Amino acid sequence: MRKTLILVATAALLTGTAITGSAVARDRSDRTELTSSQITDQASARAAQMKADLRLTAEQEKNWPAFETAVADVWKKQAEQQIAWRNAHAKQQGSVDLIDEMRKDADEQIDRSNTRNKLADAAQPLYSSLGDPQKRSLAEAFFRRDRDRRSY
């Protein structure tokens, strides 16, 4: 019963997204879309800002490069996925294959999960060396990044 309810809710969500997608596209048509390099540049700037906000000690600085590389890779991948999604939906005509969309969404969720695990592995040494105020600052920077990314 629970699986059926989840399946029906997912189908309704995807159907609603397909129906309202063109309205959202019209609302965003007046916005300039960012290129992959612009999004990557923003990510690099965000990482530099994060580092400055953390005010790392010399000992903590040693853990920064691995984290910076991992987070830049994640953000670059997110930018590429966002652009691919945007391009695919711009070309989309006609009805949406609900089952195909569900499978694509599931694959994307698996990929995002694996990517976040890799980022967590890379971030662990840095995060362990941070004090509580620095940890809060890092968390705030990540949440701010997620909000900003949704506006692409």
Image: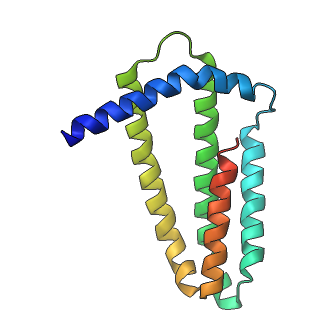
Q: Residue furthest top?
A: 94
Q: Is residue 52 above or below residue 69?
A: below
Q: Is residue 48 above or below residue 17?
A: below
Q: Percent from the top left, x then y, of residue 13? A: 44, 32
Q: Is residue 4 left or right of residue 32?
A: left
Q: Residue furthest left?
A: 1
| Closer to the camera in the image, 136 or 66 | 136
- Tell me how the rendering is colored: rainbow
| Closer to the camera in the image, 43 or 10 | 10
Q: Is residue 28 above or below residue 53?
A: above
| Closer to the camera in the image, 89 or 76 | 89
Q: Percent from the top left, x then y, of residue 82? A: 61, 38
Please report the residue visible at 42 percent of the width from the left and 53 percent of the height from the top. 113
Please report the residue visible at 74 percent of the width from the left and 29 percent of the height from the top. 28
Give the quadrant of the N terminus.
top left
Please report the residue visible at 67 percent of the width from the left and 57 percent of the height from the top. 145
Q: Is residue 59 above or below residue 14?
A: below
Q: Percent from the top left, x then y, of residue 95? A: 48, 12
Give the quadrant of the C terminus.
top right
Residue 54 location, quadrant: bottom right
Residue 99 location, quadrant: top left
Question: Count the marks: how many?
Answer: 0
Residue 27 location, quadrant: top right
Residue 147 at least partly seen = yes
Please report the residue visible at 42 percent of the width from the left and 54 percent of the height from the top. 114
Q: Percent from the top left, x then y, of residue 125? A: 52, 80
Residue 62 at least partly seen = no
